[in-house]
Amino acid sequence: MLGSLEHPHFYKVGDILIGGAFSLHSQISRTTTTFTSVPEALRCTRIKTRELRFAYTMIFAIEEINKSGVLLPNISIGYKVLDGCGSAQQAVMALLNGQERDTGQTCSGQNKVQAIIGASESSSTIVISQTAGIFNIPVISHFATCACLSNRKEYPTFFRTIPSDYYQSRALAKLVKHFGWTWVGAVRSNNDYGNNGMATFISAAAQEGVCIEYSEAICRTDPVEKVASVVKIIQQGTAKVLVAFLAQVEMNLLLEEALKQNMTRVQWVGSESWITDHYLATSRYAAILTGSLGFSLPRARIPGLREFLLQVNPMKDPQNSLLREFWEETFGCNFQASMYNQTQCTGREQLNDIESPFTDVSELRISHNVYKAVYAVAHAFHSIFNCTDQECSSNNTTETNQVVEQLQQVHFTLKSGDMVHFDENGDPSATYELVNWQKSDKGGISFIAVGSYDALPPDGRLFKMNGKKITWGAHFKERPQSVCSQSCPPGFRQAQIKGKPLCCFSCIRCAAGEISRQNNTDCMLCPLEYWSNRNHSQCVPKVTEFLSYEETMGALLAALSLFGASLTIMVMCVFFWFRHTPLVKASNSELSFLLLVSLTLCFLCSLTFIGRPSEWSCMLRHTAFGITFALCMSCILAKTIAVVVAFKMRKPANTVPQCSIPIQRTSVFVFTFIQVVACVLWLSIAPPLPHKNIVYAKDKIILECHLGSVVGFWAVLSYIGVLALMCFILAFLARKLPDNFNEAKFITFSMLIFCAVWITFIPAYVSTPGKLTVAVEIFAILASSVGLLFCIFFPKCYVLILKPEKNTKKHMMGRINY
């Protein structure tokens, strides 16, 4: 069983008694338990000057309040400060009951404190809060950051003036993400502080896309071998950034072993517990910790504190062994005679003559929290006693639950301008400075604020950098890169490696139509009218495709169209030149000229299919095609009917020209007019319009004419087909007529070619993509037009030009082939 604690190190009576629990020593000397006598008190060694300053800051704040007369004007505040290094449980019991060993006096309550300031560690604070909470005594911690203490159900009387680790852990996660460190190592204290803080950090880091290579824990009681194995794991890891969520004692153990193993190439990211600890900022650890980054509380000033600390002297309290121990360590002397020729302490040494962390008030952060905690308690009692500027109602009885209630409601501003208040969980507002360890001009270490973090920022920005230059870890000339896998270059995406964390990945090129930029984790699909460039790094407008005059295919088809039209005009000129000859007259010159005109238009209408589709060109190309071919088929049908009628007449030579011409004109007009009406209806209901086809080809935009009404298109095409079929049937039936009417044979061949071309066109038109669809349609127009021109007119031109002896009435009346 642990021995009892010694008497309080600092004690003063008062109307109100405030307790203080600080870890004034860092080591405990073990004693032998005999079970036959009362165990000896635990001996604590190796004094912690920073903790001693915390204790004196508490005393200073109490003395300042007692002297000011503003708070609790006629009420005095006393204090009772204990060292909690041996046992937090015994420390809190000593604060509640006193140190008397007589069991008959331990529960008298005469020395009972009404509020407790402390402790400096989360685990100790948890023990103190659980015990003090039974008696409704509030505990106000200046340094316990475990997020678990915000649980009001378990710790209903706990308050603190330092933010919860919940905010610090999230801030550290944002910090490593800000510098692009996605692959980090982690080490923590194996206690409530380290385990809870690291758990929150790992959770927040996962949300930020940061992976943890390893997470190790050490305890102050671990053997050296355990700490050495942790350092070895850090050395062997590939992460160049180490997040250390360690209390000061565990940090000392880790650093000592790091020195033995020469661990240098690590960028330290520290928690608030050690990142501004001057005890660590020595030349011994400078090679390891220079460049460290971490969040700390904002710096503050406490006027008069340094002067108060300089007055500390063991001669003023000769019975205080703690002060004698502090004096001996600070000045390297000894109050007792020594056989090792040590300098004997006189008590006349001056703290002002040396540089000591005890008197260094340039970096007051945690000390300011102690100062605020004392003032919070004073303000709570000020409200309980209904104090005015002159006096307090000291007749009021004080219940412990009143103190807790009033602490929950305190809201005041210190002379420094800092506001003090607690939320519903007893926590203050969370604001931090980002501290960087940099070498000072004197060769020491300075804590330089290079940024800030506010958990509830008014402008919505959590993390800010102030533009100051940052010093990086030892042996790093510039910001280290700590990633498991290098970020993928533009045009690649990340592919997770099986069995590895998310931060470990391979790079795979983006698919066609997808891009990625630097540091992108995945590929993005380009918008519909854009396509990925060659490197898949950006979206560029898709290539627009249509049959143009500039390309070879368009120019060739345009040339063929013009050639066909020119050839038709030449035939027309030949027929016009020989218009009075029997052959031209027998061929029904009026219909022949009308047919040649329609064929010319058929050749020329194919030009409307070439070039960028526009609203007018889309409407013109299909209607011109439909009407000109309907006119052409109407002329051929009229000629075929004329042949059949002429064969059935008794006197074809005298009767046909006179009686058939009006019928032929009427039939041509009627058959063509029907197509005109169909085209007008088509254009009125759903006309063809330009359309960007982005479905068929993914890497390009096909500019085409959308048919509008599919029914209209196929109705126009079908009508031409019906006329062609009628021509073919009639011409086929009349193919064996007398030779002077053998034009039916040529019409039969022309219709056979025409039908073959357009029957082949339909499946080719449906299945051909892009601009080839237009090319197929033009080819069908040109091929069918050429077929009609050659089959019907070239035999006649052959006779007219090369066989003029056959172009006589005698030959026309006989059975002569031409």
Image (cartoon, rainbow, N blue to C red):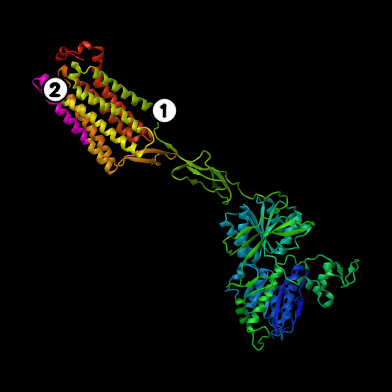
Residue under circle 2?
657
Q: Quadrant of the N terminus?
A: bottom right
Nearer-the-camera pick, 708 or 627 = 627
- Give the extent of the magenta segment: 646-674
Query: Counting other residues with Cα less than 10 Å from the Cα at mark 2, is it few (<14), some (14-19), or many (20 or more)?
Result: some
Nearer-the-camera pick, 172 or 41 = 172
Is tag 2's residue or tag 1's residue first in the polypeptide sequence? 1
Above or below, comparing residue 793 to residue 672 in the picture: above
As helix, strand or loop, the secondary structure at mark 1 comes to helix
Query: Counting other residues with Cα less than 10 Å from the Cα at mark 1, is it few (<14), some (14-19), or many (20 or more)?
Result: few
What is the magenta segment's predominant secondary structure?
Answer: helix
Between the C-alphas of marks 2 and 1, the distance is 48 Å
User: Whole-percent x and y of residue 445?
Assistant: 76, 58
The kind of residue tagged 2 is Pro
Nearer-the-camera pick, 680 or 106 = 680
Residue under circle 1?
552
The kind of residue tagged 1 is Thr
